[in-house]
Image (spheres, coloured by chain):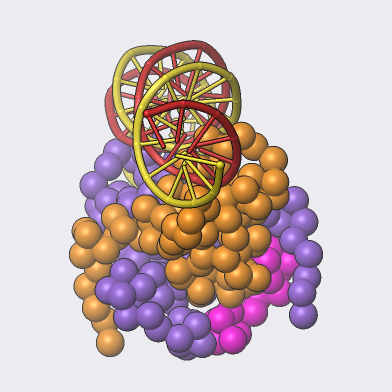
Chain colours: A orange, B purple, C yellow, D red
DNA sequence: TTGCTATTTCGCGTAAATGCGAAATAGTGG
DNA sequence: CCACTATTTCGCATTTACGCGAAATAGCAA
């Protein structure tokens, strides 16, 4: 079951991680776990300017973490990679030194 | 089961993601899935200078992704957060549009 | 101590990310 | 078409990351 990792794969993985490597973008992720939100809601949640939040969203979308859909005047964003949330639970457990079993990270 | 995410948690999560957001650091992770390696092995695998690889390692260690142990002249690094590997499998699946079930990401 | 090996830290130049306001774009209604 | 709203893109200044070689540090052996 050992599959060789290609450069392309590794580059994409790094892009996803880089996209997730910002507190405000994680804040956005949290806001979207309950379901889709329009940009205006996310601007409120994050507390930065529209242009900044919009850039955060495009970074996350570019990496494939989020998907968007335009309806009328508003654009709605939603999580496209559900395993991110469960992985973060694993990170928190690791931070507390709980050394959780791998199998429980996404369960 | 809704737990509020603290600023501290979010900052730590972002630090981990940021640490993982570099192709060479992911290459290091791959090298360490088989078990611990000394820095010299990782320098060979990555192909950058010693100082650069050493910095990558300290970033990963600082974030809690790796742990190190000095034995004699050499320092051995190993993965401290096993769920990273399984999460990456989920990313690859997502990239291929396979829309894998969350439960399978870490199984 | 000296010398050798393995690794980290330092200093610096370059590249990329961040955040903002202003301007541009797109959709809706009059 | 015009005005208005929601969102994105642009330009720019500031900060942070990267990668290297040189120097520093640590452990071992003679």
Image x and y of residue B3, in percent? 78, 70
Residue A7 colored magenta? no
Q: Residue at x 36, y 73 (%)?
A: B94
Left or right: B17 in relation to B1: left
Residue A95 colored magenta? yes
Q: How many marks?
A: 0
Q: Work out whether B68 lies above or below A103.
A: above
| Front position in the image: B39 or A25 | A25
Quadrant in which the N terminus of chain B appears: bottom right
| Front position in the image: D26 or B31 | B31
Question: Residue A52 falls in which quadrant of the image?
Answer: top right
Question: Residue B16 falls in which quadrant of the image?
Answer: bottom right
Q: Work out whether A13 lies above or below B83.
A: above
Image x and y of residue B84, in percent? 48, 69
User: Is residue A94 visible to us here?
Assistant: no
User: Is residue A78 visible to us here?
Assistant: yes
Q: Work out whether B37 lies above or below B23.
A: below
The span picked out in magenta is: A91-107
Image x and y of residue B95, in percent? 31, 69
Q: Residue at x 58, y 55 (%)?
A: A38
Left or right: A32 in relation to A13: right
Q: Work out whether A8 lies above or below D4.
A: below
Q: Residue at x 78, y 64 (%)?
A: B4
| Front position in the image: A41 or B63 | A41
Q: Residue at x 64, y 62 (%)?
A: A30
Image x and y of residue B24, in percent? 33, 51
């Amino acid at each position: 079951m050992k599959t060789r990792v290609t450069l392309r794969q590794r580059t994409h993985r790094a892009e996803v991680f880089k996209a997730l490597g910002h507190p405000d973008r994680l804040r956005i992720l949290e806001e979207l776990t309950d379901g889709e939100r329009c940009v205006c809601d996310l601007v409120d949640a994050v507390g930065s300017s529209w242009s900044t939040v919009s850039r955060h969203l495009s970074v996350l979308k570019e990496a494939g973490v989020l998907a968007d859909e335009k309806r009328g005047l508003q654009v709605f964003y939603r999580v496209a990679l559900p395993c991110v949330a469960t992985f973060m639970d694993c990170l928190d457990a690791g931070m507390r030194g709980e050394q959780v079993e791998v199998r429980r990270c996404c369960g």
